[in-house]
Image: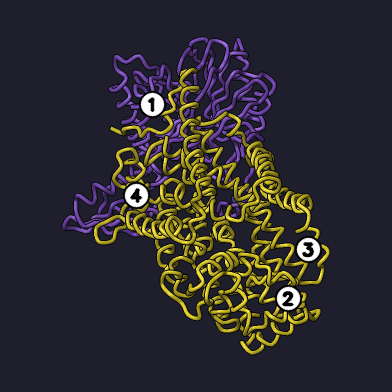
Amino acid sequence: MIKLFFVTDIHGSSVCYRKFLNALPIYGVDVAVLLGDLTGKVLVPFVAKGNDAWECTLMGQHRDIGSKEELAEYKKVVENAGYYWVHQTREEFEETRSDPANIDALFKSLVFTRVQEWLDLADERLEGKPYQMYMCPGNDDWFVIDDMIDNAKLVHPCDKRIVQIDNHEMVTSSASNPTPWDTPREMNEEDLEKHLRGLVDQIKNQETAIYNFHVPPYGYSLDLCPKLDETLTMSAEEKIHAGSIGAKKLIEENQPLLGLFGHIHESRGAQKAGRTLLINPGSEYSEGILKGVIIMLDKKKVKDYVFTSG
Amino acid sequence: MWDAFAVGFMNQGLTPSIWVVVSLGVGTFLGANLIWATVISVIFAGIGFPLVWGILGGSMPRSGGEYIYNSRILHPIVGIAQSFGDAVIWLMWIYVLAPLAVDPGLTMTFQFVGWAGAANWLTDHTWSAFLVATLFNIIGFMFVVFGIRIFAKVQKVIMFFGIGGCAVIGVVLTVTSRASFMAKWDVWVTANGSADLVYHNFSNVVAKAAGVASIPTTWNWADTLGVMVAMSWLFAYAYSISFIAGEVKRPDKTIILSNLFAILVPAAFMLWIGLAMYHSIGFQFLSASGYADNNGIDAIGKLPWSTHFVGLAAVMAGGSAFGKVVSAIMGLSYVAFTMWWIALSYLAFPRILFAWGMDRMGPKWFTDINPRFASPVKNHILCFVLGEGLLALYFFKLNSTMQNITVTGMQITSVFAVTALAAVLFPYMKRSKGVWDSSPYKTWKFLGLPMVVWGGAINLIYLALLLYEFIFKKAAGAFTGGSTILFAAVWVLGVIWYFFWKQRSKSVGVDVSMTYGELPPE
C-alpha cells in the first residue's frame, strides 16, 4: 500500500507551499502531488514615502505603513495570501502603472521568481528523503512554468504524460475548459476532450489508473461553484456546474480507479462515478490553510482516504 | 447579507419567541419588566453573540457550525462531543416546534376565525396533531432538501408573512387603549360564560389558581433577570448563520453583521410590543394572563382561546369579519415562524454531519452532495427519519411541557458556553495559531485585548446569568434529573463516537489527527 498526498490550487501562497513540504514527513506519505494553479493573481506595490514609511492598497483598502517592522508584517500577509509585493518609489509606481505591458512584465518576473524559489526549497528539503513529489501547473499558470518544473532536480513533472506510481499509471492534465478569466491553458470542450482522450488512451490498465485532471468532470458535486453575473460577482444562492464534459465522458467510459481534481476551490468533496472514486480536496489558500487529501492505495483499489486541513 | 440575516433572524422566531417570553417567561416570573429585560439582554447578547459567532465564522468560513471552531481551537474530542449535543438539539427542535406549530399555532388561528371544530380536532386527538405535525416536518424537509436556492427564495416569503403578522400584532396592541381593551375583554369573557374573569377580577382568579396572595402590580429585579431565560429565545439563536458560513459572500463582514442585525430587529419588536402591551393590557393583567396560558388554569377553560399575547390581541381585533382576518394573520405569523424553525433544523443538522464526514468522523456518505440540488440529500433524509421518530415519541410517549426549556438549557451549556470559551481562548491556543494569524480580526482590539476575547467573556457572563436562573431559580425545570442525564449521555455518546471513528480510521491506516492538526509553515 502507498500513501498519496494530493493538494491543489495554492495560488502563490508561500505559507501553503511550505506547509505542503512539511506535510510529507508529518503525514508520513510516500508520494505527494501538487497540482496547479500554482501562481497568484495580485501584485501589491509598497510605495516609499520616505523616512521609513510606505503606502499600499491591500484587499481593497489603502494602508499607511509607519515602520520597517510593520512593513515586514505586511509583506508576510501579502505572501501568505498568495500575492506578490514589490518596493517602488512614487516615480517607479507611476511609470509601471502608466503601461499595462510594464505591469505584465513586472508581475511575471515576480511570479516566476517565486516558483523558482519554491522549486529550490523543494530540492533542499527533499534531498536524501524517500518522498516522491510531483508538480503540475493549472489553467492559470503560464507555460514558462512547465520548463521550470522540468528543470527541477527533485520535483518531478507530470503534466501531459503518464507517470508510474507504484502499481498505478497516473495521467495528468493542467488544461481546463473556458473560464470567464481567459486563462493561458483553456481549451474549448471539443479540443479539451481530444487532448484528454489522447492522454488516457496511452494508459495500459484503466482499472488501476489515476486521472489527475485540473478540471473536474461536469455534473458531479465536485464542480459546483457560485454562478457569476455579468460583472463577475458571485451569487450566494445559485450554484452551477463548471466542470468539463470531456472529462466526464472519459471517466464514465474508462472507469479508472481514481480521479483527482482541483480548479473549483469551493467544492471540496468525494464522490463515486461508477467504480471510480472522484476527489477534489478544495482550496483555502488565501486563509493560509493547506487543504489536501491523503489516499491509501492498494494494488488494485483505494483502501481509504482522509481529507486534511493544516 | 440579506439571506444570512434571514437565516439568523428566522431562527430567533419573533412571534413564537415573544409568546415564550410572555407566557413562559412572564407567566413564571410574574414581576418581570419586559423593557429592562430586553435592554439588558440586548446589551449582553448584542455584543457577545456577534463577536463570538461572527469572528469565529469569519475566521473559519465553513458550513458546519461551531464544530469547526471548537474542534480546531479546543480539541477534536470537545468539538465532536458538543457538536453531537448540537446535532441532537437540532433534532429535538423538530419535535418541540412541529407540535407548537400545531398547538397553539394552528389551533389559535382556527379559534380566531371561529373554526372551533378544526381546532378541537387538533387538540383532542393525539393522532390528528401527530399527522399535522408530520405535515409540517415534511414541509420543512422539502423547503431545504432541494438546495439553498429554493430555501432562500421560500425563506423570503415566509419572513415577509411572519414579520408582517407580528407587526399587525404590534399595531393592534398599540392602537387599542386600556379602556377599549377592558371593555372588549369583559364582553368577550361574559359572552363565553366566564363573567368571573372580567378585567378587574381576572388577576384575583389567577392568583387563587396560582396559590399566591396576589399577582404583582409592579416589577422587581429578580423576576426581570429571570425572564431573560425565556428571552434568550429571541436573542441567542442567530448562530444558525454559522451553518451556512461557507456559502456566504464576504464572510468576514457578512457573518458578524447579520448576527448583529438578527438580534437588533427582534429587540426592536420586543420593545415595541412590550411597551404596547403595558399600554393596552396593563402590567398585572399581562402577568396574570401569561400565568393562565402557561399553566392552562381551569378558570379559562370556557374561553374560545387561551390568554397568550396573540390571543389578547385577537380579543382587541374583535369578532367582525375584518377582525377575524386580522386575527388570522396574527395567528399565521406564529405558524410561519415555528414552521421555518423546522426548516432551519434541516439546514443545520445535515451540515453538521457533512462537517464530521469531511473530518472522517462519520461514514463517507455523510459527505455525499447531490449534484443536482447541491445539497447533502442523504443527510436530509436521515434528519427527516430521526425527526419523525422523535415526533412520534413526543406525541405518544413524552409530551412534557418543559421540553422546550430542556433543549434551551442544553443549548446554553453544550453549544453557546463551549463556543464562547473557544472564542476567549482563540488568540492564545497553539492548536489554532495559524488560523488566528490569518484571521481578518487579528487586529481588532479594545484595551489591548482582542475583540474576540471580549465577545467571549461578555457572552459567558450572559450565559452564566441564564444558567444561574436555570439551576437555582424558577426556570430550574430545565435541569431535572432526566434532562441532566440526557445532557451527560449525549456528551458521552459524542466522545464514544469520536473514539469509534478514530479507531475505525486507524484500522485502515488513517490518522484522523491529520484533519485537525496545524501544519508548521517553517
Q: Is residue A3 above or below residue A310?
A: above
**Label 2 vs label 3, nearer the camera:** 3
Measuring from the top left, give residue B223's x and y in whole percent: 45, 69
Q: Secondary structure at mark 3?
A: helix
Residue B326's tag is 2
Location of mark 1 (residue): A148
Q: CA distance from mark 1 to mark 3?
A: 77 Å
Q: Residue at x 43, y 64 (%)?
A: B46
Find disc 3 in the rendering and name its residue.
B119
Could you say whether the residue bearing mark 2 is in a helix, strand or loop?
A: helix
Looking at the image, what colour scheme do you see?
by chain
**Which residue is under mark 4?**
A44
Whether labels 1 and 2 belong to a single chain: the reply is no
Chain of the residue under the numbered disc 3 shown in the image = B
Question: Can you give x and y, in whole percent of width and height, for residue A225 in the image?
Answer: 58, 43
> Image point 69% across, 71% down: which residue?
B300
- Which residue is nearer to you in this view: B150 or A120? B150
Residue at 44%, 34% in the rendered image = A291
Chain painted in purple in the figure = A
Q: Amino acid at mark 4?
A: Val
* Image depth: mark 1 or mark 3 in front: 3
The mark closer to the camera, 2 or 4, is 2
At label 1, counting other C-alpha atoms closer than 10 Å, the crowd grade (few under 14, some 14-19, many 20 or more) is some
Disc 4 chain ID: A
Badge 2 and badge 3 in a common chain = yes
Image quadrant of residue A287?
top left
Q: How many marks?
A: 4
